[in-house]
Amino acid sequence: MGEEPSSRGDLTATAERVHRSVEGVIEGKPEIVRLALTVLLAEGHLLIEDVPGVGKTMLAKALARSIDCSVRRIQFTPDLLPSDITGVSIFDQQQRDFEFKPGAIFSQIVIGDEINRASPKTQSALLESMEERQVTMDGQTYELPSPFMVVATQNPVEMEGTYPLPEAQRDRFMARVSIGYPSPAAELRMLDVHGGASPLDDLQPVAHAHEILKLIEAVRTVHVAETVRRYTVDLVAATRSHPELRLGASPRATLHLLRAAKASAALLGREYALPDDVQSLAAPVLAHRLLPTAQAQLNRRTAEQIVREIVQRVPVPDPSAPAWRMPGQQPPGLRGL
């Protein structure tokens, strides 16, 4: 178990330990692991969407078990109630008053398994928790622990027994990722490693929750120049006027994209964000929030394709313009993983 980080080297070691721990379970998908860690350090929530059996829940569990913090898993089913997630007030006959019994959302990492198998009413129980990190019940507000992250998995909407996530729910997730099928070589290694027992059985925490909080504080200090902020706004604004989109990205998406870019820059060892960080995260951060038009769907155009075209079209800030790094600023950055 790692000790409390007190220097830049300690912060780097913490991030590397978590990255290696998760990557040891998810074979051949280092970019997926990096994105999950980026979302965690950017104080966001992650939506993992793919067909059954490719390791969605395995990724969520590996991330949760690599950190010594409270973890709860919610199996979303059609009969799941909102109170099962947020909690319920129960009348205590001895005290002659109502007592709040916290639900599964009161944890530092919450794994929502097959989130789109629950009804939209139950899914909406997560809205306040994911955005404001609190639960309001009977006029009382209860703060959620920190760090707090929801890692949800969902099957494609064409699968039997699924409900499409409401737009407001999708907008709460910082990024959506698709794991995809492994390469033949990675699948062969998986047979060797996973054939006898699950690697999760031997997975031990490699970082404390308070170490993750220090990593999050380090990410907050990453500098973003005015030109990079304008570039982020221009990318998001382009989704709102695109002829093949009937719903563009929200202002929350702009904020999420900027926060994710800062976390990405820190993980790559920089004290400042670049347009490259924004570009690399545009598709996973923006695509799941967009709604293509009917004509675009008939043409089999995906939101990811449209986002990549927008990235190609929107002018990139001139690197010879004002320096990306603020003069004299020395925030605690992280060395690249």
Image (cartoon, grey):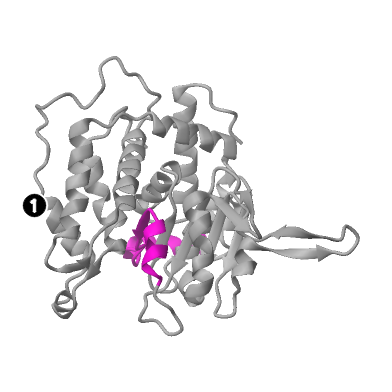
Q: Nearer the viewer, residue 28 or 206?
A: 206
Taking 73 as reference, is 68 above or below it?
above
Taking 165 as reference, is 332 above or below it?
above
Amino acid type at circle 1 is: Arg
Q: Is residue 46 left or right of residue 287?
A: right
Question: Which residue was labeled with disc 1?
Answer: 313
Q: Is residue 182 inside the magenta stretch?
A: yes
For the point 21% across and 27% down, the residue is 324
Q: Nearer the viewer, residue 64 or 169?
A: 169
- At label 1, counting other C-alpha atoms closer than 10 Å, the crowd grade (few under 14, some 14-19, many 20 or more) is few
| Quarter of the figure with the C terminus | top left
Residue 120 locus on image (x, y percent): 47, 74
Taking 19 as reference, is 180 above or below it?
below
Query: What is the total number of numbered labels drawn onto the structure image?
Result: 1
Q: Is residue 269 left or right of residue 85?
A: left
| Quarter of the figure with the N terminus | top right
Q: Nearer the viewer, residue 91 or 3?
A: 91
User: Which range is magenta?
Assistant: 165-194
Farthest residue, direction front: 139
For the point 33% across and 45% down, the residue is 255
**Quarter-wise, where is residue 283 in the image?**
bottom left
Circle 1 SS class: helix
Residue 212 locus on image (x, y percent): 52, 38
Residue 86 locus on image (x, y percent): 62, 62
For the point 46% across and 52% down, the residue is 131
Q: Is residue 245 left or right of residue 182?
A: left
Q: Nearer the viewer, residue 278 or 138?
A: 138
